[in-house]
Image (cartoon, rainbow, N blue to C red):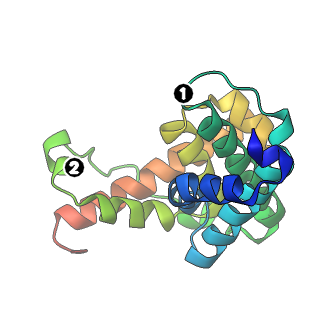
Amino acid sequence: MYCSRGDRMAENELYRRYAVRLNMLCKRYVVDDDEAKDLMLETLIKALEKIGTYEYRGNGSLYSWISRIAINNALNRIRRNRGRIVSLEDLWMNDNIPEPIEDEVANIPEEKILEWISRLPDLRRGVFNLYCIDGYSHQEISQMLGISVTGSTSALAKARKQLKKEIRRYLNGQDK
C-alpha cells in the first residue's frame, strides 16, 4: 500500500475516504465534538503508523481494521477517565418504567436517540455502544474495559433503563 511508503496523496485519500465515518464512530464513545475529532485524527495517525501490519481480507477490511483502532483508542480514554465517571449509583432508574412499543420508538427522530446515548455516563455509553451497536459480548467488553462481566451487564442494564426513561419522557411530551 502506498501509505506505508509515506505517499502523501495516498494518506490524503485515506483521510478523505474514512474521516467522516470514523468521526461518527468516535462520537458514539465521546460526547464532545472536539474530543471526537481529536480521537478520529489520533486514530488515523496510528493507522498510518501501523499500516504495514494491515492484512487485506476483502472489501471493507481496511475500514474494519481502522475502526478497531478507533474503538481501542476510545476505550483507552474511557479507562483513563474511569475515576472521573459519575457514580453508577447516581443514575439508578425506576424499574417500573414501561417498555416502549416498537411503533412508538420508530417515530422518535434518530438525532434524539443519539443525543440520549451521548448523555450516558462514559462507562455506560461505552458498554452500550460495544454491546448493542458493535456486537461484542460481555466477556469481550469486560476484557476491553478492565471490568468484570457483571460490571458490563450492570452498566448495560443501567444504560437501557436510562434510555427507556428518556423515551418515556419524550413520548409523554416532556422532552420535545
Quadrant occupied by the N terminus: top right
Task: Return the residue nearer the eye: 68 or 1.
Answer: 1
- Residue denoted by label 2: 105
Residue 140 percent coordinates (x, y)? 71, 30
Can residue 78 be spotted in the picture?
no
Task: Return the residue nearer the eye: 60 or 115.
Answer: 60
The image's mark for residue 22 is none
Label 1 element class: loop
Label 2 element class: helix
Mark 2 Cα shell of 10 Å, populated few (<14), some (14-19), many (≥20):
some
Quadrant occupied by the C terminus: bottom left
What whole-number distance in Å separates the C-alpha atoms at marks 2 and 1?
33 Å
- Residue denoted by label 1: 59
Tell me the amino acid under the disc marked 1: Asn
**Residue pictured at 31% horizontal, 52% vertical:** 97
Is 152 drawn above or below residue 9 in the view shown? above
- Locate residue 122 relative to residue 100 in the image: left or right: right
- Locate residue 121 relative to residue 55 in the image: left or right: left
Tell me the amino acid under the disc marked 2: Val
Mark 1 Cα shell of 10 Å, populated few (<14), some (14-19), many (≥20):
few
Residue 157 percent coordinates (x, y)? 52, 44
**Residue pictured at 68% horizontal, 48% vertical:** 71
Location of residue 64 (image quadrant): top right
Residue 78 percent coordinates (x, y)? 74, 59
Is 1 drawn above or below residue 39 in the view shown? above
**Residue pictured at 56% horizontal, 52% vertical:** 18
- Which of the two discs, 2 and 1, labels the residue nearer the N terminus? 1
Residue 12 percent coordinates (x, y)? 65, 60
